[in-house]
Image (spheres, rainbow, N blue to C red):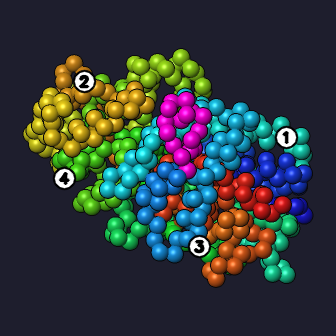
Amino acid sequence: MKTDVIIIGGGLAGMVCALELLDRNLNVVLLDRRDEKSLGGLARWAMGGLFYVDSPFQRKAKIKDSPELALSDWLSYAEFEPGDDLPRAWAEQYVHRCTEEVYEWLKPKGVKYVPSVQWLERGLEQRGNSVPRFHVVWGAGHGLVQALKKNLYQHPRFGQLKMLFQHKATELIRSNGRVSGVQVLNELQNEAFELEASAVIIAAGGITGDVEVVKRNWYAPWGKAPEDLLSGSHLQANGEIHGVAQRAGAHITHLDKQWNYAAGVHHPDAEHGRHGLSVIPPKSALWLNWRGERIGPRPLVAGYDTRYLVERICQEEKTYTWQVLNRKIALKELAVSGSAYNDALREQRTLAFIGNLLFGNRSLLDTLSTRCPDVLMAHSVEELSGKMNALTGDAAVDAARLRATLESWDREVAKGDASSDEQMQLLARLREYSGDRMRMAGPQPILDPDAGPLIAIREFILTRKSLGGIQTDLQSRVLQPDGQPIAGLFAVGEAAGFGGGGIHGRRALEGTFLGNCVFTSRIAVKSLT
């Protein structure tokens, strides 16, 4: 079989490539290991946030932003290492062009946004986002994928696209000094064949679907990887495509840079045995270690530095943690990162979405408390500690110690602005921005009898995104270890470390995952045509 371009991977990046190639009147074959209903890949599960700079939404909200400020924030947060010239150059390119190349490109395709721009990853020791930049798609990641899928299936040249699902790229074919095709395995029929093309684009994601691969590439300064990792990705994101690319001469880099979350729970609708769901940690909860003791000296609070949360938890003797709160806090602050269980957002039901913001997401709390084994509810500290110990099969949480911890915290809450507790100060800073304030409870004692029952959430580190991958130049061409491009071979999205084999450095400013799937894909197609 011959075609103009082969795309390996049917996630967001692969879909963008397909649309752009059809616009240029090219014939395309798209390979994906999953079935057709999974088109869109991990983006279907995502929260659907995109990082834009000086966007119409920011300007309307009088948020002053600029590429210069965004780049300064990015470089501070990334802490690029010597030799990271390409990742840094990709970062500079993205902040200067993301609003034009991503926002403006998606707009006519029917992608809309929640009006309030969210402020994530503000940073602790390292400055993160100085201003809000996280633009949530109306419909979440599911809505983003559905919009692009509609454009793809209704494209006037859709007949020039052949999608082969449950097909695996096993090797790249090289001839006359360039990549000229792909060896393919039809996994349904166990039949192998070859595809020929003028160019091949790798858009097949990262390594975080296989926790054993993640462990082998764990960031060495953190020591041994946690044994109880959960995966927030799909099983096919297992790094095999990186091996395929490497055998064809590609340089693979920065696989120890990963974007993991600190608050994973076992997925109520798991697709595989280690499948986790990413809880957005309730900020007004107390974050405790495996013994039910407050983690310190710096308290853990979401919204500032996700990498710090993971790093700090990895220093504990056991790497599962607890968040303790009450129903009143949970209704206002408990959320999950992604399309799952965010029904009102995913289904674009405006009144229900506003109702959840104002009165709390009762459906989500009911679902997690009844279907997720990691979410416990009780009417007393003694009952709660008993359930926590029963879940873990030990007696690690002492009821008296837990009560003393909660009472001490409640005294700090009662002090209000006079409290010297760092968590109280961090919460106060978050409430200064209306976009955060509307999603947070007011200062609320946990042991308030009118705010119960009490809730404990057992949380694990959850793998999510690979920040490293196949190294590419600023044209999305795959590079060899000597820095020379491999003719005919391109890599985009997570497979390319979202650009250059590691555009984020050590930390990601959120919204730059989906954004760079679109951005790198558009650049690749411009380059090869």
Give the CA distance from mark 4 to mark 2.
28 Å
Give the CA distance from mark 4 to mark 1.
56 Å
Q: Which quadrant of the rendered structure holds the N terminus?
A: bottom right
Write down the region rendered in magenta.
47-67
Secondary structure found at label 2: loop
Q: Which of the marked residues, 2 or 3, is nearer the chain's N terminus?
A: 3
Give the CA distance from mark 2 to mark 3.
51 Å
Badges 4 and 3: C-beta atoms under 8 Å apart? no
- Residue at screen point 19% across, 32% down: 417
Q: Amino acid at mark 2?
A: Gly
Secondary structure found at label 1: loop
Q: Which residue is mark 2?
A: 452
Q: Nearer the viewer, mark 1 or mark 2?
A: 1
Q: Which residue is mark 1?
A: 155
Q: Which of the marked residues, 4 or 3, is nearer the chain's N terminus?
A: 3
- Residue at screen point 37% across, 61% down: 227
- Residue at screen point 46% across, 71% down: 81
Give the CA distance from mark 1 to mark 2.
53 Å
- Locate residue 347: give its quadrant: top right
Q: Position of residue 296 (x, y in %)?
A: 20, 52
Q: Nearer the viewer, mark 4 or mark 3?
A: 4
| Nearest the eye: 476 or 375 | 476
**Residue 363, visible in the rendered structure:** yes
In the image, taking residue 23 as reference, residue 494 lies left or right, namely left
Badges 1 and 2: C-beta atoms under 8 Å apart? no
Q: Height in image: 492 above or below 420?
A: below
Indicate which disc residue 252 carries.
Answer: 3
**Residue 387, visible in the rendered structure:** no
Q: Which of the marked residues, 4 or 1, is nearer the chain's N terminus?
A: 1
